[in-house]
Amino acid sequence: MKQFLLIISLILISISNSLSVNWQDRKMFNVGKEPSAVFVDNGGKFANPIVYIICSGYDMNFNDTLDVKDGDETPSIWALQLKYLSQYTEPNVFKVCDLPFGSIGRLGGPMRVGYTPVDADSSTFTSYLYLPQNGKISRYTLVNGKMTLKEDLLNFKADAVSVINNNLLLSVNSPSSRIFIYDMLNKIFLDSITTPKNVMQTYSNHIDYIFAVCEGNFGKNDGKLLFIDLNMKKDTSLNAGDTPNYLSTMQENDNEACLISNGSHEMRLIGKNIELVKLPTSGYSGPRECAYDGQSWLVTAYDGKVYSYDTTAKKFTTLDSLNEMLESIRVYAPLKGNPASWMFVTAALNMDYSPSNHLYVYDNGYQAVDEPSADIGINMFPNPTNNIINIKILESSNSKAYSVELLSYLGNSIKIMSNIYSSEISLNIEELASGIYFIKYTSTNKTVLLPIVKQ
């Protein structure tokens, strides 16, 4: 156990964040049947983020034959164009493409597919989705919400896929449980690793190290979290209860990991120590996935609830209760190091196990400021704007200098104005692309970060 914790502490990057998140608003969107995985793409430099939703489709009679009159539906990829979830504009939800019928059927299992998001400094808006389909590993090229290319990379039957750099980590459970490492550039297999039974997910932030979530046998309490050191050719395992099925790390920072065990209704917070937490679920309504919002671990469950575990108070609260079996969860923070602004949850099934088709989007009430507020100390108008944004300082004393910085959606600095004494200034943003930006106001008394919308 001490060896496992030492490995964790050496790899995971430390950072602290004590800001709280208050999820206030929920919107529901219809997508394809059985939405089972969701990914958030930052959209690249100066672009609006896109949320991709992978839907398993539905085969009512399990006969591999598409019969629309029975309610059958092909798998599909959907996208939500996340412009700004506020009073200003509604997000646009649309189908990106259909996938071959029956190619990614859930059969009661989680969906573990590979995804490479747009690089934060990219201007091409290209991301990649890797799917195990019909005995092949396929790569879908996604450009700003459109599928531009599908490639079959290799003939290989895998149960799960993840990607690190140019390597695929392919999980296989028949005839035995193994992880295969495939080099996409040179088109060769680099390694094959034997794992405990039923490896369902691999995770890596460095190709020399791999975490593998192994479910074991349902009801036997023999699940494992495996840490594999590829350089040393050795592995270390952690007992993970009954049917561990999902591993996540703290958003952007990786200083703590959370392992969900569906069968034993547990989560393990893994950092310098291991905290075992019992979830308030039971029976076959166990936890599915988790995500960290900057203050708490959020957990979806088949009992229809989104739970929040406060790591400081050491207690659970129920954020929402829905009459659907909840599956995938992701959070997104526009600025790195800040609490999440949006949360995305998929409902794969209804309570009678019929297919659902709902994506739920939550925001934390972070809104642009249109009216003067002495508490904030700054007013901006008009917001949204096509060109000029006026900034008026409302603090009681303006005798000292302040600064104003214009930031991109991802926190990149675009323009800085320092040593300002005037109580009102104007900023021309006409040349910027449409989207969300931030004004950072810094005085001797406070620092305020406010969003602006460029139309």
Image: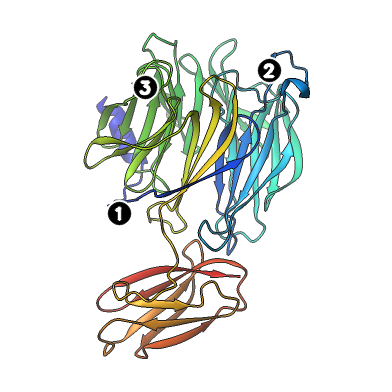
Label 1 is placed on what type of residue? Leu
34 on left or right of 24: right
Screen quadrant of the C terminus: bottom right
Q: Find residue 60 and name its label.
A: 2
Residue named by callout 1: 19
- SS under mark 3: strand
Residue drawn at 41 percent across, 51 percent down: 340
Residue named by callout 3: 237
Residue drawn at 48 percent across, 36 percent down: 204
431 on left or right of 322: right
Q: Residue 322: horizontal and vertical position, in percent?
A: 45, 33
Q: Quadrant of residue 165?
A: top right
**First of labels 3, 1 by sequence position:** 1
Other residues around mark 1 within 10 Å, as few (<14) / some (14–19) / many (≥20): few
**First of labels 2, 1 by sequence position:** 1
Q: CA distance from mark 2 to mark 3?
A: 39 Å
